[in-house]
Image (tube, helix red, strand yellow):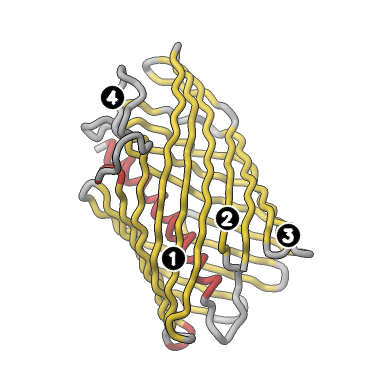
């Protein structure tokens, strides 16, 4: 039961974030033809997250851990029928590293994920559109051949309406399956841009507010990320490890400024809260929890916007 609750949380966070990335991409590319696009279309992105070392305490002893993340994405949208039907594809590559010092042992691990999204955008009457997305994902240490344990599927459907030159809202459902279980998650989105202010939101996983001046955006952002990685070659013989669950919430100021052409530099920093890192055994129970308290994070990224 404990494992199921924690597993549900990790999948929930990961699904919502992927849905946000996809819906944000679509909205940027296919806003109602009667209005200008509210946001830019990120063709290519690179992001690097760093976290300060932090300590934790378990019944078996104490330790400290240092984590980092890197991800890159590439996405394109295609017009199948003018003002009616669009196809988009996206690939998101991620890497999660952590170094753990526990009692007298040290463990360095690297995990990777590959998510490929394919979706359709159908323009409807009265400035409505229907967005459907399928995102198969592999997440593992990839030290052995790829198996079904590495595989995760995501799918979502969102109905969105452009209500004015300044606003678009949407609602929908996301479905995820893992280990034969299905989770159905309600979603709500909002994009509002007027004058120099922009609000982006997908509840309950993402919220940001920006002020833009002279090709520079300054604001605040809250985002959630979570993933579950398959351990094909457990690093510790004394602790049974089959999966690694990881999730965090980042909150802090966000700055984006134009470098040259359509390339932008992004800097985001602040606090990472609800830092969860858990080893899960073959019986689907949490073997060890390495969760830490709030800690400082920073993110430096580059994006190509269209």
* Residue 266 drawn at (x, y percent): 66, 52
Determine whether 210 is above or below 169 in the image.
above
- Which residue corresponds to mark 4? 240
Residue closer to the observer: 251 or 155: 155
User: Of marks 2 and 1, which one's residue comes earlier in the chain?
Assistant: 2
- Which residue corresponds to mark 1? 89
Could you give the CA–CA distance between mark 2 and mark 3, rounded to whole angstroms? Answer: 14 Å
Residue at 25% from the left image edge and 54% from the top image edge: 182
Identify the secondary structure beneath mark 2: strand
Could you give the CA–CA distance between mark 4 and mark 1, rounded to whole angstroms? Answer: 38 Å
Graded by Cα atoms within 10 Å as few (under 14), some (14 to 19) or many (20 or more), the crowding at tag 2 reads some
Q: Quadrant of residue 232?
A: top left
- Which residue corresponds to mark 3? 258
User: Of marks 3 and 4, which one's residue comes earlier in the chain?
Assistant: 4
User: Of marks 4 and 1, which one's residue comes earlier in the chain?
Assistant: 1
Identify the secondary structure beneath mark 3: strand
Graded by Cα atoms within 10 Å as few (under 14), some (14 to 19) or many (20 or more), the crowding at tag 3 reads some
Could you give the CA–CA distance between mark 2 and mark 1, rounded to whole angstroms? Answer: 14 Å
Q: Which is closer to the viewer, label 3 or label 4?
A: 3
Residue at 33% from the left image edge and 62% from the top image edge: 155
Could you give the CA–CA distance between mark 2 and mark 4, rounded to whole angstroms? Answer: 37 Å
- Which residue corresponds to mark 2? 45
């Amino acid at each position: 039961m404990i494992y199921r609750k924690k597993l549900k949380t990790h999948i929930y966070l990961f699904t919502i974030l992927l849905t946000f990335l996809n819906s944000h991409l679509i909205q940027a590319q296919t806003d109602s033809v009667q209005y200008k696009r509210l946001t830019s279309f990120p063709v290519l992105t690179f992001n690097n997250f760093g976290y300060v070392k932090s300590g934790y305490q378990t019944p078996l002893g104490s330790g400290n851990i240092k984590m980092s993340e890197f991800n890159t994405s590439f996405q394109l949208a295609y017009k199948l029928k003018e003002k009616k039907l669009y196809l988009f594809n996206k690939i998101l590559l991620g890497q999660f590293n952590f170094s753990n010092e526990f009692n007298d042992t040290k463990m360095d691990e690297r995990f990777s994920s590959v998510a490929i999204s394919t979706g359709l955008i159908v323009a409807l009457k009265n400035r409505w559109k229907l967005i459907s997305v399928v995102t198969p994902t592999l997440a593992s240490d990839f030290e052995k051949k790829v198996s079904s344990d590495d595989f995760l599927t995501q799918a979502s459907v969102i109905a969105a309406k452009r209500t004015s030159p300044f606003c678009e809202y949407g609602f929908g459902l996301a479905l995820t399956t893992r280990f034969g279980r299905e989770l159905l998650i309600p979603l709500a989105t909002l994009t509002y841009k007027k004058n120099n202010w922009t609000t982006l939101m997908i509840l309950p996983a993402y919220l940001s507010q920006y002020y833009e001046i002279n090709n520079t955006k300054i604001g605040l952002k809250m985002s959630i990320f979570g993933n579950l990685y398959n351990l094909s070659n457990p690093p510790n013989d004394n602790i049974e490890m089959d999966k690694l669950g990881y999730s965090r919430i980042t909150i802090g100021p966000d700055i984006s400024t134009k470098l040259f052409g359509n390339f932008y530099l992004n800097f985001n920093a602040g606090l990472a809260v609800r830092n969860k890192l858990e080893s899960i055994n073959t019986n689907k129970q949490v073997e060890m929890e390495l969760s830490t308290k709030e800690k400082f994070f920073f993110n430096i990224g580059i994006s190509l916007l269209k």
